[in-house]
Image (tube, helix red, strand yellow):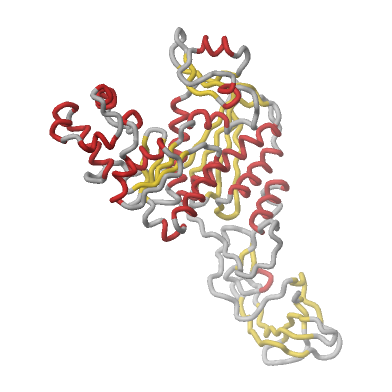
Amino acid sequence: MLWACILLPQLALDGVLRRRPPSDEPLVLVSGPAQARIVHAANVPARAAGIYRGQRLIAAQALLQQFEMVEHDAEDEARWHRLLAAWAYRYSAEVGLYAHAVVLEVSRSLNLFGPWPRFESLLRDDLQELGFRHRVALAPTPHAAYVLAGVQDGLAVVAPEMLRDALSPVPVARARLPVEATQGLPSMGIRTLGQVFKLPRAGLQRRFGAELVAQIDRLTGDEPTPMDSYRPPDAFEQRMEWTHEIEHVEALVFPLRRLTGDLAAYLAGRDGGVQRFELELEHRSGPPTRVTVGMLAAARDASLLFDCARGRLERLALHQPVLAMRLVARDLPPFVPAGRDLFDTRPVNAVPLEQLRERLRARLGEQAIRHLHRTVDPRPEKAQSDMAHVKAATKPETLPRPTWLLDTPRPLRGPPPDVLAGPERIETGWWDGGDIRRDYYVVRTSQGQCAWVFCAPGEQGGWMLHGWFA
């Protein structure tokens, strides 16, 4: 087996930064009791000013007079952690959560996504798009991958016999061993995992307990690593909150793009789609404003979801400033990707039909675009309907139907046409008084037009024109 570990060293800070547009202003996450506030994380401009993790807030304020402070929210951090686990589920059915890391078993996934360098590039591109900094390592055991990711980004150990050599130089302080061993081994002059491997197991167990020996066995693969496999939930819910009030819909576009991108990542991991989701805009007082986004078919493309939601938000008049936005998706039907021709001649930047359709519905209204389907009634005037409750036909038509059906049939003037196909007899409608009995033909007129005509059964004359082909 091969395990990839994605270490997320700035998970809490990245979760805050991805809610807002890029900025060069210093920002600091703070935590701890009111009397002993400390810096939990700092962005690049704040670190450039000398602020670091674990620093007392008073000392940070002495170094930099003005910077934005955001309270660290452990629940938010856990939510981002689970989102990334759901995203990783797209690449492997075996996904586990470690502190600030996601591990996934990839030996079988390499057959689908290509060799490890290409697979690693896919993972990094996705994480870059989602806005999370990361370190990636590959190893035969999940715990070894976890340790190696913290030591060297990009390290890949693919053979079990190479694992001990790769782990040997790792300092004990960074080997994620039990706390007592991490503190006690250096005092004995043991500073690397290679030195730990050479010590007698009985002595280690007697001095530091059985947990250290078990941890070493999990590192080297001599003992399987117990791990709860992650499974994505059956519903998606994500919330973004700001420290300021948003009064205009235009300012909601950036967080909306993030939320719909997260939804698309979750759906890709779940290999499903969404046909309906809801946006909740939370205000300082009163109930939230709810915006329902529905589509004609299940989708999971991030740009399509964003276009649909944005179109509906732009038609909304805010009656109160917005403090937070929540996206909830509970209707998650199966998703079948649309196939494309191998020699597709469409321009590269052409908008897919599904995206154009949903964009028009979002801009013009739900009723502006309708979905026609064939019915079981063979009469031309009733053979198609946009009503969802009308039963759809399952059998294919025997002959082609015209793209333009005339409201009322009319006589076909001029010389007799050339018959191209037919007849197709339609004899039905006796139950509602609209009974018809006709033989339909596809013909070419003397002017070269392709028409759909009918006449009395058994005859070829007295043509009545009923439609035109494109």
Q: In this picture, is 411 found above or below 385?
A: below
The residue shown at (43%, 37%) is: 7
* Residue 203: image location, x then y, percent: 14, 31
Residue at screen point 53% across, 43% down:
263
Residue 169: x, y in percent? 34, 37
Q: Residue furthest top?
A: 35
Nearer to us in this view, 44 or 75 = 44
Q: Residue at x 60, y 44 (%)?
A: 293
Residue 224 lies in what quarter of the image? top left
- Quadrant in the picture for the C terminus: bottom right
65 left or right, relative to 94: right
Vertical relation: 332 (above or below) 388: above
In the picture provided, is 198 more to the left or to the right than 337? Answer: left
Q: Residue at x 64, y 32 (%)?
A: 22
Q: Residue 439, percent across and down?
A: 67, 85
Question: Residue 2: x, y in percent?
Answer: 35, 51
